[in-house]
Amino acid sequence: MPAASNRPDKNPAAPHLRIAVGLWDWSQWCRSLLHGVQSYAHDKPYWRIHAVVGPEETRTLFRGPQYWDGIISPVLRDVPAICRMVRSKRTKIVSCTAVPPVKLLQLPAVRVNDIAVAQAIGKHLMAGGFRQFAYDETIRSIPHHDFRRDAVIQFAQSVDCPLHLSKRRGSTEPTSRELRRWVKNLPKPIGIFAWSMAAARTILNACAGIAVAVPEQVAVVAWDDDVVLAESVAPTISAAVLPTQRLGYEAAKLMDRLLSQKHSAGGEIEPVIIEPSGMLQVRQSSDVNSIPDRVVHLAAQYIREHAAENIRVTDVIRHMRVSQSKLERDFKRVMDKTLNAAIVDAHIERACQFLVETRWPMEKISARAGFGTKRHFHRAFAAAMGSSPAEYRKRFSL
């Protein structure tokens, strides 16, 4: 479906250049990209912009009989046809996708700095108390390079936090059962970087299907915002604000450079990287500000999850990355016990379970319950329970 042409030619004798913009759909992201291309073409009266919308319709751009001087598109599915077009040197192509096919990585490209986007999303999740992250990679039928995945990995490594990547393969669209299983098996609480707004919606549907609380246990942030989609579901979806219109403008600018032959046909062109604003639209899917004393409850959960380790108060503070004095004060107010007492209680609870449910020797129970030494275990257990571990086992074991 062609878009409206630009303004009439000032010079009727000038040759027209037919520029196609291939789009997935008419979503906010795609409309904004097209708007950016049109903004640049405003001062190019000899350009004729045509919007081709839909995966199958876009495929015909690269294999049909229609001749184009240039194609700007994030949709690069038909790799053999695109490679043939590149070799023919008749049509210039500009890629503007974050997941280009591996065989098309050398195409002239314009991309958003995904590392900066990942940092903005990650810092937001960390401010909400999340210290574990996940990324659900979009499944594709052809080998591709996911720059967003790279950016999430780099962020998680920079803050020394665990990252869980989906390993689902098979169909081009994940089934509900696959996605639910993946979300269910993730450690909680966790912050998920969603590849797109559509991916975020499917993740939230999976959470609802297995009764996982959002954002208490799973917080979700989409990589790009679409106000209509984000606010038409419950909970509404947080998202990064991408400079998509600027992406289209710079793609058209790069296309102009290619068409004017300022670069030789064989010369490699460095991708154009656009810096994002770093802004997020924070909505219900990741807004934990309404949860009272969230940091305290996350600290308590960390203690429970690491009861089998010989953890100390300093380990909790280091994990939570907060002021020690404030956390200790808030923890005592909310939990009516100190951080150290909560750690000891978690160790004792684990030891009681082992004493009742196993026939392990005391040395093994001491190690598995996080006490470190048998002597420390006996002393702490007697102080807390009023009896020795052996007496407790004799009284309560099955």
Image (spheres, rainbow, N blue to C red):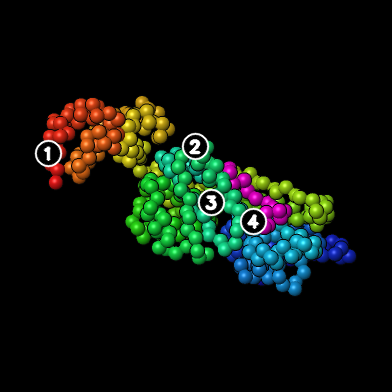
Q: Which mark is residue 159?
A: 2
Amino acid tagged 3 = Trp
* Mark found first going from the N terminus, 2 or 3: 2
Helix, strand or loop at label 1? It is helix
Helix, strand or loop at label 3? It is loop
Q: Look at discs 3 and 4 and give the one toward the viewer.
A: 4
Image position of 390 with respect to 223: above or below: above
> Where, by quadrant of the figure, is residue 353 drawn?
top left
Left or right, 261 with respect to 150, comes to right
| Residue wearing tag 4 | 102
* Mark found first going from the N terminus, 3 or 4: 4
Amino acid tagged 4 = Val
| Relative image position of residue 312 (x, y in whole percent) | 33, 29
Q: Residue at x 67, y 54 (%)?
A: 105
Instruction: Let me know if residue 326 appears in the view.
Output: no
Q: Specify the segment rendered in magenta.
A: 102-118
